[in-house]
Image (spheres, helix red, strand yellow):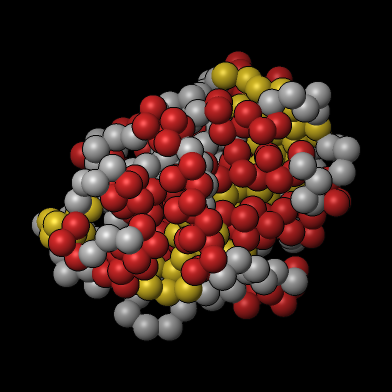
Amino acid sequence: MHLLVTGAAGFIGSHYVRQLLSGAYPAASGATVTVLDALTYAGNPANLDPVAGDGRLRFVHGDIRDPGTVAPLVREADIVVHFAAESHVDRSITGSADFVTTNVVGTHTLLSAALDSGVSKFVHVSTDEVYGSLDEGHWPEDHPLEPNSPYSASKASSDLLARAFHRTHGLPVCITRCSNNYGPYQYPEKIIPLFITNLLDGHPVPLYGDGGNIRDWLHVDDHCAGIQLVVERGRPGEVYNIGGGTELSNRELTEHILHSVGADWSMVTPVPDRPGHDRRYAVDTTKIRTELGYAPRVPFTRGLAETVAWYRENRDWWQRTRAPLLTTR
């Protein structure tokens, strides 16, 4: 079995590849992997260093928007796992063009190549942000898509393309929609690594608005395990929500991070809220639990403590990449 994994020099994709090649997914034992990544600002080849010497791994520096690069790689693959995306809401607000071309055109390029090549499974990794915002309850997979940022609109567009390729052409596509991820190797523009690295350097952290925006937190290890279940047993044409089951307001999350690094609220700087900031995300994970046996295994308190420890112990990694950005995703 050969997998093409796009965007796997990034946070989530690299974790998936490290886990797969380290034997965490027995059904993929012996699989070979080609990583395709454009190495934009958040892509870092060092994220694959723990498995760089594995003969089953090949890295290709290339762009998913380029049919000449994509087509021959897809022809070699049995399965495509598509992580590659521009994914930062704040960046999409100030400049959305790359989000449209990468997330929509790039996904179309991959889907077209997969259709031509006859792959056995195409897993499109998306986000809960495509659903919009909700005050109560949890989104099931058939909830209407109501994206509110250029980023989430571009991901919703790519989801619809993936669905259309299945419905029109029979391409065996599955779509996953995850809640907010955290863990090691996350580029320090998202709230958890940004706050951790700021505090470790003695800098204040920026908290948007009243801090009341609520997110469901999912450890990257649980997310990737859910993706692998979809790779193995997901039904073509279906959407699967993957959540962590830990809902926290940004203010509550900030309290956890402050405690984890031994800081207090004097290190928090309120900043004006993001335009169009969604108030709450929460996915219903009943489908993936009942169909595929998914269950998150990393408790948030443990996962956060381990994440703080990783950033504390890997300063060289994040000090080379860290950008002074304000974010709460």
Residue drawn where x is 47% and y is 61% of the image: 304
Quarter occupied by the N terminus: top right
Residue 99 drawn at (x, y percent): 37, 38
x then y, percent, for residue 258: 31, 62
**Horizontal side, residue 176 vs residue 258: left or right:** right
Along the line of sight, which residue is nearer the eye, 178 or 205? Answer: 205
On the rendered structure, is 68 left or right of 212? right
Look at the picture and state if 155 lies above or below 101.
below
Residue 15 in the image: state x and y as whole percent: 61, 44
Q: Residue furthest top?
A: 68
* Front position in the image: 147 or 249: 249
The residue depicted at 44 percent of the width and 45 percent of the height is 312
| Residue name at image x 72 percent, y 77 percent | 290
Quarter of the image for the C terminus: give it. bottom left
**Vertical comparison of 125 with 2: above or below:** below
Question: Which quarter of the figure has residue 14?
Answer: top right
